[in-house]
Amino acid sequence: MLETLAELDRLTEAVTANLPASQMNPKNRRHLTAIQKVMRQYFRRLETALPSRRIAALYNRYVED
């Protein structure tokens, strides 16, 4: 029984790795890393441009209840 479950797990991983949009696909791992890098840079720049500690003050100034 355990051998069957282990074999099913291996087959599932193999099939998942070959799906076009799978993050486990070796071709997509490179793209995933690149996207993570770009998103990290974007949010770092966003935090520099608009610090999160100022959001409440800006909200209170420009948004009416």
Image (spheres, rainbow, N blue to C red):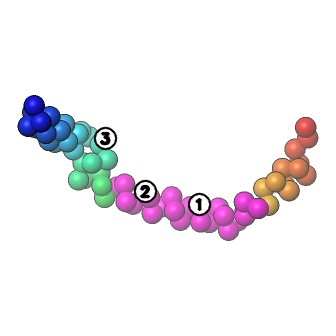
In this figure, which residue is indicated by the disc labeled 1? 43
Q: Is residue 6 visible?
A: yes
Q: Identify the main secondary structure in magenta.
A: helix
Q: Name the residue located 31 percent from the left edge and 47 percent from the top edge.
A: 23
Q: Earlier in the sequence, mark 3 or mark 1?
A: 3
Identity, as a three-letter code, of the amino acid under mark 1: Phe
Q: Earlier in the sequence, mark 2 or mark 1?
A: 2
The local crowd at label 1, few if under 14, some if 14 to 19, many if 20 or more residues have their Cα within 10 Å, is few
The local crowd at label 2, few if under 14, some if 14 to 19, many if 20 or more residues have their Cα within 10 Å, is few
| Res 21 label | 3
Q: In this picture, which residue range is highlighted in magenta?
A: 31-53
Identity, as a three-letter code, of the amino acid under mark 3: Ala
Label 1 near label 2: C-beta < 8 Å? no
30, above or below 13, in the image:
below
In this figure, which residue is indicated by the disc labeled 2? 35
Q: Quadrant of residue 43?
A: bottom right
12, above or below 44, in the image:
above
The local crowd at label 3, few if under 14, some if 14 to 19, many if 20 or more residues have their Cα within 10 Å, is few
